[in-house]
Image (cartoon, rainbow, N blue to C red):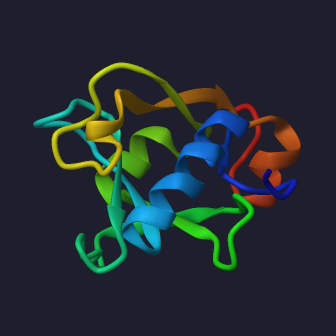
Amino acid sequence: MTSPTSRVAVTDAAAALLRQLTAQHGKLMFHQSGGCCDGSAPMCFPVGMFLTGPSDVHLGELEVGLDDPIHVWISEAQFEYWKYTHLTIDVVPGRGAGFSVEGPTGNRFIIRSRMLDDAELTAFGLKPGA
């Protein structure tokens, strides 16, 4: 569920949970945290509950079978660490992040990552082999 040059994707299981959570909470968005409270957990919020700012980078959109895509953001500092990485949002059983909407469901969102391939690096203006 991603375009060929997207930095972010979603698994079918996570997309299903996102559809349920959207029915319950309205439009959602993700912010990839960089650390303190919940480590590097992807945090899911109703749109408007978490405000992005000029130091946040828009990673992309998740198409999960809703009218509107779910936007994914990351802090600029965290993006510098992960700019050569493709992120996939997945879900596993467990206690969700403290402020993230999946918390009460008995599931938690996680990030699976892989290095961008040469074609993706070039598409994002990054030098392959750097």
Picture coordinates of residue 42, whole percent (x, y): 38, 43
- Side of 86 where 36 appears, left or right: left
Picture coordinates of residue 12, whole percent (x, y): 72, 38
Q: Would you identify the image quadrant in which residue 125 lies?
A: bottom right
| 39 or 94: nearer the viewer | 94
- Side of 46 where 50 appears, left or right: left
Residue 45, compared with residue 38, is above or below; it is: below
Residue 59, compared with residue 102, is above or below; it is: below
Residue sitting at 40 percent across and 29 percent down?
Answer: 107
Picture coordinates of residue 8, whole percent (x, y): 64, 49
Residue sitting at 35 percent across and 43 percent down?
Answer: 102
Residue sitting at 23 percent across and 30 percent down?
Answer: 39
Q: Would you identify the image quadrant in which residue 112 lies?
A: top right
| 97 or 59: nearer the viewer | 97
| 126 or 1: nearer the viewer | 1
How many circles with numbers are drawn on the protein? 0
Residue 125, compared with residue 105, is above or below; it is: below
Picture coordinates of residue 67, whole percent (x, y): 69, 79
| 25 or 51: nearer the viewer | 25
Residue sitting at 46 percent across and 74 percent down?
Answer: 27
- Side of 84 where 98 appears, left or right: left
Task: State the residue lying farthest toward the left.
Answer: 37
Q: Quadrant of the C terminus?
A: top right
